[in-house]
Image (cartoon, coloured by chain):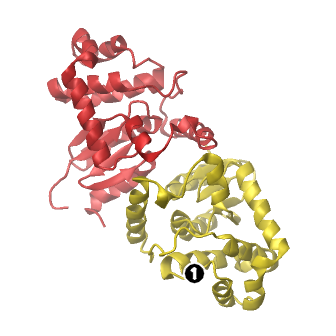
Chain colours: A red, B yellow
Amino acid sequence: MTTAEPIEFWFDFSSPYAYFAAHQIGPIAARHGRELRWRPFLLGAMLKLTGMSPLTEQPVRGDYARHDWARLARLHDQPFRLPDRFPILSVVAARAFYAVEATAPAVAGPFALDLLTAFFGRGIDITDSARIGEIGAAHGLDPELLAASAREPQWREALRLRTDEAIAKGVFGAPFIRVGAEGFWGSDRLEMVERWLETGGW
Amino acid sequence: MTTAEPIEFWFDFSSPYAYFAAHQIGPIAARHGRELRWRPFLLGAMLKLTGMSPLTEQPVRGDYARHDWARLARLHDQPFRLPDRFPILSVVAARAFYAVEATAPAVAGPFALDLLTAFFGRGIDITDSARIGEIGAAHGLDPELLAASAREPQWREALRLRTDEAIAKGVFGAPFIRVGAEGFWGSDRLEMVERWLETGGW
């Protein structure tokens, strides 16, 4: 690695593992002086391609995941309760994110983190554009403009392009971290990501 | 955790991730003064129940796994080459293991580690009972008795029972580490296992 490649953090707003990792990826990027690019996409599109179903619907693996999420929450001292309605279609939240990234990039990362925390930590329905507007207001964003963003063609298109990009890059799960062309799947690979950043790869 | 529960290391002799983890689990058990129980089973039986296919046959995820195995080999400085014939049916190796565990328990762990290393590090065909006999000979075992073990009803039955036990315990992948009733899936969870052992759980 000769230049300081940015870190891409690919995730779906409906992924508990992304929620846990999202709280760690910012500090990791900061420690290594790397730009962090939040990249929400629609994981469902990729699951279709890989023949996978949502984790909670998988026999045995779903039970393990539920236990594991509670365990990770206690380990990282993060509030967590699997929402009654889960998984959700994260399209409204993801389009809102790309609207914010394009118009107020400085708050895009904190906004993404707040959306994940609202959903998994406080049970707020982030498929509801009014709730998304309220979360944005805390970051100085116009709640009504934000609530309307999910219906606007340009953010619809932005999300579609990012989801295509995820598929093209082989991003098959969430979270999926990329440093240059090097991909790392899963919240349990953050230590390896950090080692990769420290050493320049091996 | 009030008593020092043993560590169960569930794996399939055809799992590269188990190969990488197998070299670390012994030192982890030793550091925490825990008994280590090697528990080969037939992962294919569980894949059927969870609707999964072997990793290398999965679109996109298979490519990632191949890249990841090479990366883990370099990281841990372990020889690794994905055998031409892969995955294999590990039934011969697993039955031989249970024969050794019952008759020469002190060498069972080192023998299991050698089988994994022979297959993934040196490309030796561990579906061939003659090769298994040779590997056992290095541990002072009778190569002919060992080579014959896969055909003996008692070791056939031992493996069947262990595979049933794996299914009953929700062991859906390899490696899968259990400390008491607490399960940890994946070679990338070894640090969490160690933390669990250090703290007594959280």
In the rendered image, residue A131, in percent from the top left (x then y), is placed at 36, 13
Rendered position, B51 above or below A122: below
Image coords of residue B132 (percent x, y): 66, 83
Q: How many marks?
A: 1
Left or right of residue B184: residue B165? right
| Residue sticking out furthest to the right | B154
Pointer 1 residue: B125
Secondary structure type for disc 1: loop
**Location of residue A19 in the rendering, given as x and y in whole percent from the top left corner:** 42, 34
In the figure, residue A126 lies in which quadrant? Answer: top left
In the depicted view, which residue is nearer to us: B160 or B31? B160
Residue type highlighted by circle 1: Asp
Query: At x 34% / y 10%, what residue is drawn?
Result: A130
Residue A129 located left or right of residue B50: left
Position of residue B25 measured from the top left corner of the image (x, y, whole percent)? 58, 65
Quadrant housing the C terminus of chain B: top right
Residue at 66% in and 79% down = B111
Q: Residue at x 38, y 56 (%)?
A: A192
Chain letter for mark 1: B
Please name whichever residue, A168 or A171, is drawn nearer the observer in this view of the structure: A168
- The crowd level at tag 1 (other Cα within 10 Å; few <14, some 14-19, many 20+) is some
- Relative to residue A9, is residue A4 depicted above or below? below
* Residue A174 is at least partly visible in this image: no
Residue B166 relative to residue B70: left or right: right
A87 or B60: nearer the viewer: B60
Q: Is residue A130 left or right of residue A149?
A: right
Q: Is residue A141 above or below residue B91?
A: above
